[in-house]
Image (spheres, coloured by chain):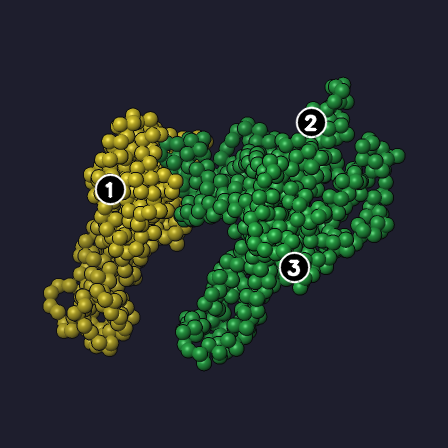
Chain colours: A yellow, B green
Amino acid sequence: MDKLNLKSLTKRFGDLTVVDNLNLTLRSGEFVSLLGPSGCGKTTTLRMIAGFVTPTAGAVEMDGRQLSSASTSLPPEKRRMSMIFQSYALWPNMTVEQNVAFGLKMRKVARDEQTRRVGQILDVVQLRHLAARYPNELSGGQQQRVSLARALVVQPEILLLDEPLSNLDANLREEMRGEIRRLHDEFGITSIYVTHDQAEAMTTSDRIAVMNKGRIEQIDDPLTLYTRPKTRYVAEFIGRSNILEGRPNGSSVAFDGFEVALARLGTGGPIHTNEFSLRSQNVALHAACPSGDAVIVPGNITERAFLGETWDYAFRADACGLKVRVTSPPLNIFAVGQKVWLEINPSHIVPIQEDHHA
Amino acid sequence: MAELGIARNRDAAPAGFGAAVRNALSPTTLVALLLAAVLVFLVANPLFQLVKDSFTRASDHSFTFANYVTAFGRPRYVQALINSVELGAAAAIFASIIAVPLAWGVSRTDMPGRGFVHVMVLASFLIPPFVGAIGWILLGGPNAGWINKAWIALTGASAGPFNIFTFWGLALVTALYSFPLIYIFTKSALDLISTEMEEAAAILGAGPVQTTFRVTLPLALPAIIGSVFLVFLEVLGLYGTPALIAIPAGFNVVTTQLAAFFENPVRIEVAAAFSMPMVGITIALLWVQRRLLARKSYVTVGGKGGHREPMALGTFRWVLFGYAMAVASLTVFMPLIIILQTSLSKAWALPMSAANFTLKNFQQVLFDQVTVRQALVNTFQYAIITATICTFLGFAIAYISQRRLLPWSQLLANITLAPFAVPGIVLAICFYAAYAPPPFSLYGLGALVVIAFVTRFLPISFTNSNSAIQGLHPELEEAVRIAGGNQARALWSVVLPILKKSLFGSWLLIFIIGTRELSTAMFLSGPQTRVVSVLTLELSEQGQYEMLSAISVLLLVVTGVLTLLGTTILGRDFMLRRN
């Protein structure tokens, strides 16, 4: 069942198009991330859903009912949504309890019902013992949990999260993104999560929409996004990719230094591009020529860097100009200049479309 | 490396006698010791003399409580104290009724003409309170005041309804020229509240009105209350307006009562004792105000804020605009028009006509009347000297305390700020007590007025410099040191060039308020060292409103021109950057 529908949503500020003809549908209970660098239009999209920004064209629909269009916009307070802000926006003049109860008060929930639900949600986020504290007396992680409780207690139609973890330090961030997913699984609230951090998006989301210059480049589940990037932009934004040039040639594709049969690429169907993505983690280096039916390219190491959990090698083929970056486990050690064999599984070579914006 | 310069000085104290001597000979230390001596002279000694005199018998200089018995033994004197507190409370309430809606309107709504309203508030801030009071005497005097005359002409009544010479008249006029303080504090608090705070309320179901009353205003409340206290204190120490209005109305407030103790014979010891409650109240309220504003988390909550949508008020925005314009008429338009008209009239009570028009008042003020001319020259001379000394001294102390060039530099800072807790008129008593009698015998010299002014305005130049230096990263200076320059070189080549605008800003601000300072000058200026503000009180007693208006116009023109200059160079709100 569709919960939220963004139809050709567009926002222009003067000459600047921030969100460009964006279409997105969320199923009920789904958790979708908008992922992209700053300035890609993800926050503006979220604020149009919330009703803080009126679209220039297109529409926002919830449960088939129109909320926003260029001509009319239901004010935020009538949308029955919740939002987690980057700054948490906890009101410093109210206690934790008062902050959490605010939305219930606005919804005219009876007093004892308010108390019960506030207590319940504070138990869920494990903060009941701090109910009488003021926000400035809490740590960053606790403030974050208060803001989650405040958003969830009203059982919103949709939960909007605007870079909620960007003010936390690294450890806490990992803990909280697990917490956010756990709460989502518990309450099943349709959620939209705006972030520029791919790890956050990967760990929390059912689907990720990668945004670039006001458009969605690709929307897929995290694994598909990683293994089958559709555009060069996505291939380079998610993980680390080698972009290979290949010329489709009848039933095979010719790359610099090797050739692969179309059938082995595992894409099915014809290919209309000269660009292919190859993840640096999906290739292997060997000190001796391996056997098997994978593609083998001889060459040597030109650069290396130890990144702590992995090695980052630069490989150059002997016979041609092929250069590939390879990510290897810590114990696969090769010296610069060492003779090596590169092993490529052709099914990891993914054709990518021409960029929308190229 | 970054800690080097600081660490050396910190270690110097316990490093033995030889090191202490070497350290004492370093130029920074010499400068700091000099500053300490200056501060003792300007601040510590006068304050000490005030307390000491209040316990001293005038005849034989022995210890006594008699001054307190005299000061608080008469119901009339106690009543003056009560009147002051009541006046302060009434004016503070009026002022917040005026200021808070305007601040909210300008900061958060789509009220039309927000920029203009802001400028009008700044204009009321710039009008010296006693000039405003003179304007209101001309407007609201019981018989001849223009408002009453207009009323009589319109209704045919035999007497006008309005009398400025009453408690409530005084409270209103006082509020009209002290409300900008509340406006400034409230507006900057509202400006600082993150938009996300309001959006969080909106998304949870609060409409604009609910958001305003449940989130926005409560968040600004500490700033509002703090500034209301400040207005209360300002009114408590105000001398000019009560002298012009309360005395003719037949009642006294603390300041006018203090002035009475200074009439022949001068009873300085009684005045000192009588000023103690005022100092006590001031210190107590400033402490409360600091506590209120100390909850910084109220305003420094970050977030990306984003694009702030002003609240749409519908037709109510015109109501709010009308209110703002009414306030502007009462504080700026009406008083200034009446003063300008009076300054160009032969007799102010007569209607405007060609026969009544004259430029003679200006000729008198600028050329004919030696006393007036002398007072004008004195005023500008003292203001220039005061502003220059204050800017220099304030910067030096701020720099030393910020960069912790001495172990006890924080103490220097605290002493510098102390005069802020002393009303101007009490400061005048301090200086009279400390430096009028031998061995200093400064009474009648311009120097006495200037040093009192310097002490009074030093907290302003200090806080200005302090926040400017705070915004300057120490690494800029450390880069000079590591490149081979000494501290003085760092100061001269980097710090001063960067801060010159902000230093000019505090010079200008102190010059402007120096030209209008009344209460500090009151007891300190002799016949040859009279300043314009003191002169206006005398002219008012003599009923010379035409000349008085001409002086006011001159003062306003100078203030206006300098403000425009400051605005052009430093931006519109250069006067407001005080903490």
Q: Is residue A278 visible?
A: yes
Which residue position holds label 1? A129
Please, what secondary structure does the residue beneath circle 3 have? helix
Q: Which residue is mark 3?
A: B435
**Labels 3 and 1 in the same subunit:** no
The residue at the point 31 percent across, 42 percent down is A133
For badge 3, the amino acid type reads Tyr
In front of the other: A171 or B98: B98
Viewer-side label of 3, 1: 3
Q: Quadrant where the N terminus of chain B lies?
A: bottom left
In the foreground, B208 or B136: B136
For the residue pair A96 and B224, the one nearer the viewer reads as B224
Q: Residues within 10 Å of mark 3 (few under 14, many from 20)?
A: some
Of all residues, the one furthest to the bottom in this rendering is B18
Determine the residue positioned at 67% across, 64% down. B439
| Left or right: B128 in relation to B493 | right
| Residue farthest along the left direction in this orientation | A291
> Label 1 is placed on what type of residue?
His
Q: Which chain is home to disc 3?
A: B
Q: What residue would you read off at disc 2?
A: B162
Residue contact at pointers 2 and 3, CB within 8 angstroms: no
Q: Marks 3 and 1, Cα distance to the nearest angstrom?
A: 62 Å
Name the foreground residue: B3 vs B271.
B271
Chain hosting mark 2? B
In three-dimensional space, the C-alpha distance between marks 2 and 3, rounded to whole angstroms, equals: 45 Å
Element under disc 1 = helix
Comparing marks 1 and 2, which lies closer to the viewer? 2
Q: At 48% across and 78% down in the image, what residue appears?
A: B21
Residue drawn at x 60%, y 43% is B71
Judged left or right of residue B455, residue A137 is left
**Which amino acid, mark 2?**
Phe
